[in-house]
Image (cartoon, rainbow, N blue to C red):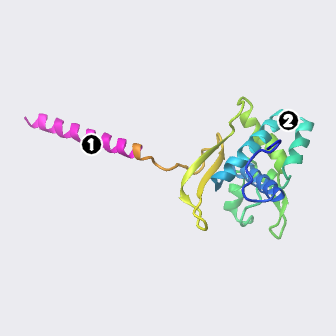
Amino acid sequence: MRHRVFGKQLCVKEDHRRAMLRNLAAGLFEHGQIETTIPKAKAVQPFVEKLITMAKQSSLSSRRAIEARINDRAVFAWIKDPNTKEEKKNLHNLWDLPAEDAIEFNRYGELRKAPRLVQHLMTKVAPLYADRPGGYTRIIKLDKRRVGDQTDLCILQLVGKEEGPQVSGRRSNRRRVADKRTAYAAEARKKAAETAKAE
């Protein structure tokens, strides 16, 4: 009997799986979209949606519940060289954070001050979905495979953050045939118009 057994095992132990889901969710909240395998994306999607639903309540109890489920850490720490002017301009590109207030580095280039993940989730991510009852994420299958084991890759992204790089899945054969048919019909109409004009 499978009482209280749910979710996919993903071929890893329980502690590893829990840490992996937490890290995937943190990366999604930090970057707006992540590239991962399809089984991992399907496993982390309900976890992420429950966290966003809790964050929408914006109460102390919901904040503590989120902190119990996800590791609170400094976000936006992936910047390569904080001393260049281009990177300082791009610090606030995804979530519209003011670069002066949000992130500070010490003189050695180490991160000194940055927004915390739970605060970022409750103040920046959750208000985007205040009027939305669910379905905060989407999975887009990619037309490429991972180099090591050739597994299918996908992009898990937050709905409403599509202004970044355009992501499109594999073009279907039906769409390809329909495009050819439309192009052929347009060419035939053009030739018919030219012959009618010549006569």
Horizontal and vertical percent position of residue 132: 70, 31
Q: Which residue is mark 1?
A: 184
Residue at the farthest left position: 199
Disc 1 secondary structure class: helix
Residue at the farthest front position: 1
Q: Is residue 49 visible?
A: yes
Q: Residue at x 62, y 51 (%)?
A: 155
Amino acid, disc 1: Tyr
Q: Is residue 95 visible?
A: no
Q: Magenta residues?
A: 175-199
Horizontal and vertical percent position of residue 156: 65, 48
Q: Residue at x 92, y 37 (%)?
A: 61
Which label was assigned to residue 198?
Answer: none
Q: Is residue 161 magenta?
A: no
The foreground one among 149 and 32 is: 149
Horizontal and vertical percent position of residue 68: 89, 47
Identify the main secondary structure in magenta. helix
The foreground one among 2 and 119 is: 2
Q: Is residue 197 magenta?
A: yes
> Would you say the residues marked 2 and 1 are in contact, meaning their CB atoms lie under 8 Å apart?
no
In the rendered image, the quadrant that contains the N terminus is top right
The foreground one among 183 and 116 is: 183
Amino acid, disc 2: Ser
Image quadrant assignment for residue 134 = top right
Mark 2 and mark 1: Cα distance apart in space = 56 Å
Which label was assigned to residue 58?
Answer: 2
Q: Is residue 83 above or below residue 27?
A: below
Q: Residue at x 80, y 68 (%)?
A: 109
Horizontal and vertical percent position of residue 41: 67, 50
